[in-house]
Amino acid sequence: MIRLTQIRKSFGRNEVLKGIDLTVSKGEVVAILGPSGSGKTTLLRCINYLERPSGGQIEIGDLRLECKHPSKKEIHRLRGKSAMVFQQYNLFKHKTAVENVMEGLVVVQKVPKEEARKRSVELLEKVGLGAKLDAYPSQLSGGQQQRVGIARALALNPEVILFDEPTSALDPELVGEVLAVIRKIAKEGITMIIVTHEMNFAQEVANRVVFMDQGAVVEEGAPNELFRSPKEERTRQFLQRMT
Ligand code: ADP
């Protein structure tokens, strides 16, 4: 349901994605691993056009977009198909938890406020924040803020949720509650691409693991295979450093 073909991205002369091919099936959970600076975040941001790829093709569901010359309408449609969960949560500071979750529904999807609120409350309950509906981000822990971020992504009912190192800004004791929520929604069959440094989590939750280095996919495979017997030396070295 998602097919990336030869995705390229340069910042000035720095080519940070060197022709990425990646296919993700409906309901699949794909973890992307790799050293810092290998292009993982840039790849995620290209999938919903927070970054404009320099070349390649993105297919999600019934949409096929040539990155060289997309129309505004195609970009708009592409953005509607995915939702991002950010490292730094990116919540509106002056809106409550429930208002943060409602925002996209009301503003982008034009859902009536009453209905948007109802759905947002349900989603906040689902991520364990039923008691924090009216709290502002500053009144929430990092783990709670990230769970609001996840509820906000779910609210848009996207075809794929893109997680950009969702736990890397959290204090260690708060990581578990966020991973538990991601684990729960993974079981519901939502398609997810997760950039993470949490190796145990990736191994447990992902159907497939993709290892990137220097702007390219080095190898990919089932978590058990890739973690136990990586084929490429670069993967082996990375995994050794991480564990
Ligand atoms: P990763 O997520 O694997 O750590 P990134 O995708 O964040 O890697 O970064 C890949 C490379 O792209 C890095 O060299 C980084 O400095 C560069 N880069 C990322 N974003 C920008 C930007 N907005 N402008 C210039 N260079 C960038």
Image: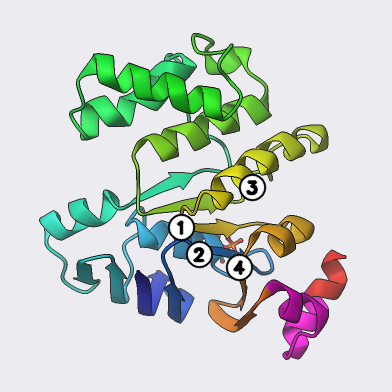
What residue do we see at 16% from left, 59% from top?
74
The amino acid marked with disc number 3 is Arg
Q: Name the image quarter holding residue 99.
A: top left
Mark 1 highlights which residue? 191
**Nearer the N terminus, badge 4 or badge 2?**
2
Which contiguous range is marked in magenta?
223-238
Image coordinates of residue 206 in percent, x first then y, are 63, 63
Work out whether 98 lies above or below 151. above
Q: Secondary structure at mark 1?
A: loop
Q: Nearer the viewer, residue 52 or 122?
A: 122
Magenta span contains residue 77 = no
Image coordinates of residue 175 in percent, x first then y, are 74, 39
Work out whether 175 lies above or below 55. above
> Residue 207, which numbered label?
4
Work out whether 96 lies above or below 217. above
Work out whether 10 lies above or below 119. below
Q: As drawn, is 150 to the left or to the right of 108? A: right
Distance from Cα at disc 1 to Cα at disc 2: 5 Å
